[in-house]
Image (cartoon, helix red, strand yellow):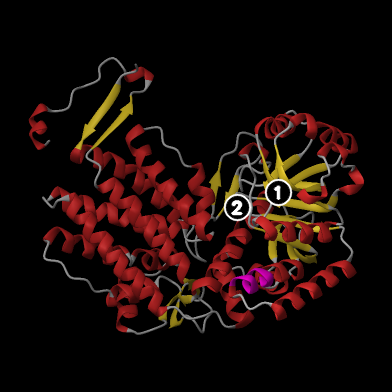
């Protein structure tokens, strides 16, 4: 077993914080409309240029083991924020770093780290409640564009395109972002359908950055029953492979040798394919498969039909120009179904809506109707170089997620002001001194997003924060114009769901690190001559 280095208590926490501090500083440089670019080295080709915090976070890895532990904990926190709401990754990091810095000072002077962490968590819960009270519903296209523009680092053109894409997709529609082939970013409306089922195996993933399986020129099998018999499945798989097209399997499940055969053939490059579970259960699954069949121009093979897999031909399969499969959802774009047949199906569902008395049935029918009616807005991101296109694509994807978050839980003034207002109103009681100072640390940490925005704009954070606190409501600092104004009227707004998620994940990371009493890391090869014992004088703390 390789030699390990063991650090205890303050020694461990201080070394870990070195990584946290460096990680936070790197992300902070990108923050807000006045943030700068970060150059990321690549194994080949020119360096990647980005102002996206999450893109920077993914690339950071330190040589020293203990600081890198802090980096990895923060990377996990910002990843969670990105996956949940698509924005707020740098905010997560700023909160966590500030809490860790203050928490270290408190623990060093004798406060119990468990008590401090408990106070941080209680204060965070109170702030979350206040953020919810501050939230207002998104009103119209204009505010949608404001949310998107903020998420696009102040790029009004991209923000407007995102807002238009979401509006055109409709309530049941989907927005897909892909790299374009021109300098200009274009928006297209295509026929499409989305349902909440993801790939059955991560081995189907083709886009590692977004963890998606992207297929083009796709044949689609719609099969109600479970697929497990590989001998039954092989004849159809061979027919599809010979056609040269991609293959999507939608069924109750694909398991055992049948799933393994798909995965192996995909990995060998014999066929581009993916398998997902059919949406719904029982009778609803049948109806959903029929809906997809109509959109894609294929047949839905239901159990009562008694048709075996080996007897299904290419002409029985549905077709789509493109399919995007994520962890939890599948989007079918450009199905070959007949528009008249789709309209007829929608009319049939409307008639069923009039006849049903069940709230649940009504909800399911409305979902099916929205799925059939909602098209797909396709944003083709343009740019002068490959580096620019990749950066813009990442930003636009985050903006789409941010707008969806705003539609779900509402908006608050941006620029870090919502945190300052919520912190001033948050209340909770405690008789524990460690909890009290922990809560104060959280309230102070919530100033950090505003401070960083102001700093990146070249202004004095302390003076401007004082003026913001003297004001009320939406009054705050607009970084693009470097003025104090009503931020909502100026279009500087944040989805409250993004702020709450960033707060939650930042607090989780900081309290985890703060309550860690030891670290165990592997010594580098050249330093493995002697693994020093910890100071035995400290052992009485156990």
Q: Is residue 463 above or below residue 226?
A: below
Of the image marks 1 and 2, the number of the one nearer the N terminus: 2
Which segment is the magenta one?
360-366
Disc 1 crowd rating (10 Å Cα; few below 14, some 14-19, many 20+) is: some
Residue that label 2 marks: 328
Q: Which residue is mark 1?
A: 386
542 shown above or below 106: above
In percent of width and height, residue 444 lies at: 27, 65
Residue 248 disc label? none
If the image is split into quadrants, where does the N terminus sit?
top left
Structural distance between the alpha carbons of marks 1 and 2: 29 Å
The one of 402 and 153 positioned closer to us in this rendering: 402
- The dominant secondary structure in magenta is helix
- Residue 435: horizontal and vertical position, in percent? 17, 60
Mark 2 falls on what kind of element?
loop
Q: Secondary structure at mark 1?
A: helix
Residue depicted at 70% across the width and 67% down the height: 368
Q: Quadrant of the C terminus?
A: top left
Left of 262 or right of it: where is 524? Answer: left
Rendered residue at 38%/84% (across/down): 473
Residue lying furthest right in this view? Answer: 315
* Quadrant housing residue 238: top right
Report the residue at 85% width, 72% height from top.
Answer: 344
Image position of 259 (left or right of 469): right
How many neighbours does mark 2 have within 10 angstroms: few (below 14), some (14-19), or many (20 or more)?
A: few
Residue 464 appears in view: no
Q: Is residue 43 visible?
A: yes
For residue 59, side relative to residue 13 (left or right):
right
Q: Is residue 295 magenta?
A: no
Instruction: State the image coordinates of residue 112 (x, y, percent, origin top left).
Output: 14, 51
- The image shows residue 319, relative to residue 295, as above or below, that is above
The picture quadrant where one finds residue 529 is top left
């Amino acid at each position: 077993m390789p030699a390990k280095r063991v650090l205890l208590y303050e020694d461990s926490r201080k070394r870990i914080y070195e990584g946290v501090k460096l990680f936070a500083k790197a992300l902070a440089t990108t923050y807000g409309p006045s943030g700068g670019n970060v150059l990321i080295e690549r194994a080949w080709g020119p360096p990647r240029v980005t102002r996206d915090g999450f893109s920077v976070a993914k690339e950071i890895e330190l040589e020293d083991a203990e600081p890198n532990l802090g980096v990895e904990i923060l990377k996990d926190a910002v990843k969670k924020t990105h996956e949940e709401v698509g924005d707020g990754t740098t905010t997560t990091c700023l909160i966590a770093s500030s809490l860790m810095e203050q928490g270290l000072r408190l623990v060093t002077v004798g406060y119990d780290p468990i008590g401090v962490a408990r106070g941080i968590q209680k204060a965070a819960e109170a702030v979350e409640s206040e953020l919810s009270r501050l939230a207002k519903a998104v009103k119209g296209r204009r505010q949608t564009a404001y949310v998107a523009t903020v998420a696009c680092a102040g790029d009004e053109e991209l923000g407007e395109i995102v807002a238009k894409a979401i509006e055109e997709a409709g309530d049941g529609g989907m927005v897909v972002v892909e790299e374009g082939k021109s300098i200009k970013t274009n928006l297209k409306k295509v026929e499409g359908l989305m349902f909440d089922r993801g790939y059955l195996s991560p081995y189907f993933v083709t886009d590692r950055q977004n963890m998606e399986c992207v297929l083009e020129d796709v044949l689609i099998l719609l099969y109600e029953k479970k697929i497990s018999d590989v001998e039954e499945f092989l004849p159809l798989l061979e027919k599809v492979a010979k056609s040269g097209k991609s293959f999507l399997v939608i069924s109750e499940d694909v398991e055992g040798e049948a799933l393994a055969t798909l995965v192996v053939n995909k990995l060998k490059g014999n066929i581009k394919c993916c398998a997902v579970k059919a949406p719904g259960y029982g009778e609803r699954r049948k109806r959903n498969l029929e809906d997809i069949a109509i959109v894609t121009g294929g047949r839905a093979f239901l159990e009562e039909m008694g048709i075996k897999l080996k007897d299904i031909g290419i002409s029985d399969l549905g077709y789509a120009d493109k399919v995007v499969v994520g962890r939890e959802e599948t989007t079918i774009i450009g199905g070959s179904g007949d528009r008249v047949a789709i309209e007829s199906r929608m009319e049939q569902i409307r008639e069923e809506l009039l006849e049903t008395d069940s709230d649940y049935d009504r909800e399911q029918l409305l979902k099916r109707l929205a799925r059939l009616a909602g098209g797909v807005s396709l944003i083709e991101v343009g740019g002068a170089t490959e580096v620019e296109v990749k950066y813009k694509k990442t930003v636009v994807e985050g903006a789409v997620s941010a707008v969806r978050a705003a539609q779900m839980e509402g908006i608050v003034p941006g620029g870090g002001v919502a945190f300052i207002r919520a912190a001033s109103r948050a209340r909770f009681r405690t008789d524990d001194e460690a909890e009290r100072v922990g809560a104060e640390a959280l309230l102070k940490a919530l100033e950090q997003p505003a401070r960083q925005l102001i700093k990146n704009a070249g202004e004095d954070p302390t003076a401007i924060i004082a003026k913001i606190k003297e004001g009320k409501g939406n009054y705050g600092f607009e970084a693009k114009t470097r003025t104090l104004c009503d931020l909502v009227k100026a279009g500087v707004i944040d989805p409250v769901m993004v702020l709450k998620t960033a707060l939650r994940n930042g607090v989780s990371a900081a309290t985890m690190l703060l309550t860690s009493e030891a670290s165990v890391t592997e010594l580098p090869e050249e330093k493995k001559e002697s693994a020093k014992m910890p100071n035995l004088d400290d052992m009485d703390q156990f």
